[in-house]
Amino acid sequence: MQLAAMEAEKLLDPATAAAARSLNARLREASRREGLLRVLYDTATDLTGIRDVEAVLKAIVRRTRSLIGSDIAYLSLNDYASGESYIRVTDGAATALFRNIRMPLGEGVLGAVATGEAPSQSADYLSDRTKSHLASSDAAVAAEGVKAIMGVPLRAEGKVIGALLVADRHAHNFSSDDVALMESIGTHAAVALENARHFTEMADALARLDQAQQQNLAHVKALEELSSLDQRLMETLASADSLPNLMLLLADSMDSEVFVVSPMGETVAGLGANPDFGSPDALSAAEISAARTLPIPFTVKDRQYTVMSAVAGDQHLASLIVAGHVSQDRLAVLERSALVLSAALLFERTFQDAQYRLQLELIDELLNPRSDDTEAMKRRAGRFGLAGNSPLVVRVVGVREDQRQRALAVLKRHAQDRPGITALHESHLCVIEPASPRDRADGANRGEISGQALVDVLKHQRIEASVGSSQAVTGFSRLATAHAEADAVLRALQALSRNGEAADRAALGTAGMLLGAMDTPFATQLLAAQLGPLLEYDRRRGTQLVLTAWTYLENDASGPAAAGALHIHPNTLRQRLERIDAVLGTSWRKGGRSLDVHVALRLWRLQSAGIRTPLT
C-alpha cells in the first residue's frame, strides 16, 4: 500500500517500486519457509521423542493433517507377502470402509505411492481416468466423500515401508509446496517410525531377556530346592520310621495334608486314614497314575486331590495323595517323593519278608512238642520280644480259607512294633505274644479277652474271625500244649456256633470245663446218664432229636428261634420236642435237670466236632 502511494506521488520511479515489491515477496517467502522449517523441526523432534510405534503412527497422521490443512491424513504400510499396501492409521476418517482400504501395489494413488517411485496426486480421484481403480476402494472413497488425494512414499533404510497421504472432500490440485512439505514430513516420519520400531523391538528383546533371566533364576532356585529336598528324602529313607517321616516332610513341602494309601484305597501303616480314597474316582485316578507314572488330579465329595502312585516295575505298591490343587512347581516334589515311597516300601517289604520267614521258622520250632528251651531258641525268640521266663499266650485265629492271606497281612500290620510272633502254622493263623493281665488267672479283669482285639481289627477290614486263646504259660516247652488248648477253644467256639467271638477256656464257660475231660470215663458216663435213651433213639431211627434238643436249649428254649436255626417249621419242632419228652421225660427242659442235659448236650456237640485234645 505504501509503495503504491509513493509511486502515485512520483516519490518512487516504477523500476524502484518493482524492485521493492520483489524484495518484499522474497522476504515473505523466506519467512514462510522459516516457519515451515520450524514446524518441521518441532515435528521431527516430537516424533523422534516417541518410543511407542502406535503413538508414533498416530502423531504422524495428526501432524500431517494439521500442517497440510487437509480433511483426512492417513498412513499405509506395505505387506510384500500379499503384494498390498494397507491403511494402518488415519486421522479425520469417518467410515470403517475407508480406514480398512487395502490396495495392490501400483494401483490407485495409494498403491502407486507405496511402490516408492514418486509422489502422486489426483484432483478428483473417482473421476480421474488416469488412475487405476478397484471397486472396493472406490466404494470406500465414495462413502468417505473424498475427492482430492495426494501422497508420498515412506522410505527407511533404503526400503519403501509404506505411504503417507492426505485427502480432501473437495476437488482441487495440491500445490508443489504442499507436495514438498509432505515429502519432508514423510522423511521425518519414516525415520521416527523406524526408530520407534527398533526401540520397541529392543524393549521387547530386553523384556524377553529379563523374563528369561527371571525364569532361569526361578529354575535355579527350584533346582536348589529339589536338591535340598532330595537330600532330606534320602535322610528320610535311611531313618527308622521312613514312612511317617516321609509324610511329615512331604506335608511341609506341599503345605497340605498328605495321605499314603494302598492300591485298594486302604490306609498304609495307619497313616492318614480317609474313607474317600476307596471311592471309584480315587481308585481310578490311582490306577491311571500307576500306568502313566504321572500325578493325576481327582475330586471326591467336592474336594480336590492329586494322586501320585508309587510303582516298582509293573507293580503298584501304594499311592501318595495330596489334598487340594498342586501347583506345577510342586509336581516335581510329589514325583520325587513317590520314588522315595517306592524305595521305602520295597525296603520295608524286604525287611518284613525276612522277619516273617524268621517268625515262620521260629513258630514251628516253638510249637514243636519236642522243642527245648535252648540258648539259640531264647536268642531268636528274644529278637521278637518273647522270653521263656515270662508268661506267654498262644492265640489261634480262625478265618475263611479264601481270606487267610489277607487276614495274615492285616494282623502283621496290627502287630508291627509290638512284641510277639504272627504267622501261618498248620494251615491256620497263630499268634504268640506276652500275656497281658487279662490273660492271667489272677488278672483283675477277666471280662475282656485280649484276643478280642484281633477279632475287632479283622472285622474293621470286613473279615469275620474267631479267636481261641490259651491260658498263660511260662517256658517255651509248654507252648505246644498251649497251642493245642487255643486250637481246642477255637474249635469249640465254631462247634457251638459262636463264630466272630474271642474266648479262652474260662470265657467258654461250661464248655471250657468240658474240654479237659473229653475222653474221660466221666464224659462217657455223663452222656449215657443224661442223653443215653435219646442217642440210642437217633442211632436206631436215623433222627436228629439230640441236635434238636441242643439247638432248642442254645436258643434259650425259644421255639421260633430254634425252628429258624434248624430251618424247619414250628409245628415240626413242636412234634420233635414232644418226642424228646416221650424219650427223656418232660423234666429235661425244666429246672436243674435242664442244666444237666444242656451240659451233656454241649459235651456231645464238642465230641461231634472231633475235639479230642486232652488239656492240662
Image: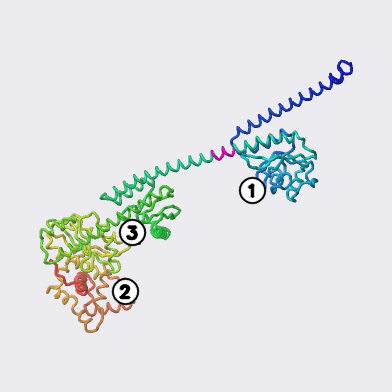
**Label 2 crowd (10 A; few <14 / some 14-19 / many >=20):** many
Q: Is residue 563 above or below residue 349?
A: below
Name which residue lies at 77% across and 25% down.
26
Q: What element does badge 3 sit on?
A: strand
Q: What element does badge 2 sit on?
A: helix
Which residues fall within the magenta stretch?
196-202
Q: Look at the image and tell me whether residue 1 can be seen.
A: no
Give me the C-alpha separation between circle 2 and circle 1.
Answer: 101 Å
Q: Is 454 positioned to the left or the right of 476 in the image?
A: right
The residue that mark 3 highlights is: 312
Marks 3 and 1 close (CB-CB < 8 Å): no
Please provide percent x and percent y for residue 320: 36, 54
**Quarter of the view holding residue 590:** bottom left
Q: Give the amino acid at mark 3.
A: Ala
The residue that mark 2 highlights is: 563
Q: Is 338 positioned to the left or the right of 581 in the image?
A: right
Which mark is on residue 80?
Answer: 1
Label the magenta part by its dominant secondary structure: helix
Q: Give the amino acid at mark 2.
A: Ala
Q: Residue furthest bottom?
A: 540
Q: Nearer the viewer, residue 259 or 539?
A: 259
Q: Look at the image and tell me whether residue 331 can be seen.
A: yes
Mark toward the start of the polypeptide (3 vs 1): 1
Q: Give the mark toward the camera: 3 or 1.
A: 1
Give me the C-alpha separation between circle 3 and circle 1.
Answer: 59 Å
Please provide percent x and percent y for residue 469: 20, 63
Please provide percent x and percent y for residue 334: 38, 51
